[in-house]
Amino acid sequence: MSGERAITTPAGITDGVLAYAGRLSTSAPQFVEVVPDESAILDQCFFNVILSGDKPVYGWLIWELTGFWLEAVRHAVVERDGKLVDITPPVDGEARLLFVPDPDWEFDYLDPKPTRRPARHLLTDDADVVKWAGLADEFDALKWRNSRFRGERIEMVLAPGKDTRRMERLQRDYNAAAKVALGKPLA
């Protein structure tokens, strides 16, 4: 493999990022500095922002699987002195993140539920990557349909039978497709 692949913050706001962000929200994507609050809890952005006392801003984090696709997850940051800041400790040590505010969505603290991930935005038309991304989207959809929010965590509950067999097939096909796509050199 020539080059390194990682899920990371995109290096810039490219045409692909703008196109994907436009599918997520009417707001423009922007880089947000990560300044973790001392009392913030890892991977609990929604609770961190509300406990901070600052104005919460809800939206999406955009990640890039280098050379393959962009993906998004729901996230929350705060507004301080007119500037957006991510106060949640980063899992991967990133110092800045790409965030798209979404004024049409707000986390429901009284009835928290798992949030569905949108489809990935492909950065290539390679058939093996297209297949892999489709399987990843299908896998995410199955996980979402079978997820329940329990306290501060999300758990997946699969009934024995059809859904369990489907999950096993998806996992097998996803792993095989990933192996083929990841074996290709970066463009």
Image (cartoon, grey):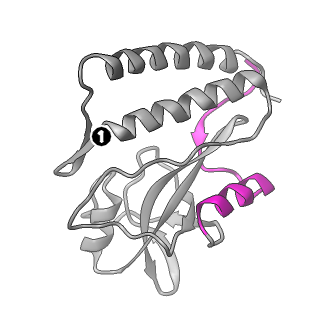
Extreme residue in the right direction: 187
In x, y percent, where is residue 138?
51, 32
Instruction: Identify the residue at horizontal 73%, vertical 57% (top origin).
Output: 19
Quadrant where the C terminus sits is: top right
Q: Does the magenta run of residues contain 105?
A: no
Q: What secondary structure is marked by label 1?
A: strand
Asked whether, in this view, residue 166 is left or right of residue 158, the answer is right
Asked whether, in this view, residue 29 is left or right of residue 172, the answer is right
Quadrant where the N terminus sits is: top right
Q: Is residue 95 above or below residue 173?
A: below
Extreme residue in the bottom direction: 81
Q: Is residue 187 above or below residue 71?
A: above
Amino acid type, callout 1: Ser
Q: Quadrant of residue 169?
A: top left
Q: Is residue 40 above or below residue 92?
A: below
In x, y percent, where is residue 149?
23, 48
Extreme residue in the left direction: 151
Which residue is label 1 attached to?
A: 147
Q: Which is more toward the observer, 78 or 148?
A: 148
Span of residues in magenta: 1-25
Q: Quadrant of residue 48?
A: bottom left
Extreme residue in the front direction: 162
Instruction: Identify the residue at horizontal 65%, vertical 31% (top origin).
Output: 5
Q: Is residue 145 above or below residue 168?
A: below
Instruction: Identify the residue at horizontal 72%, vertical 21% (top origin).
Output: 128
Instruction: Identify the residue at horizontal 43%, vertical 49% (top origin).
Output: 116
Residues packed near mark 1 inside 10 Å, few (<14), some (14 to 19) or many (20 plus)? some
Asked whether, in this view, residue 112 is left or right of residue 70, the answer is left
Q: Quadrant of residue 130?
A: top right
Asked whether, in this view, residue 175 is left or right of residue 20, the answer is left
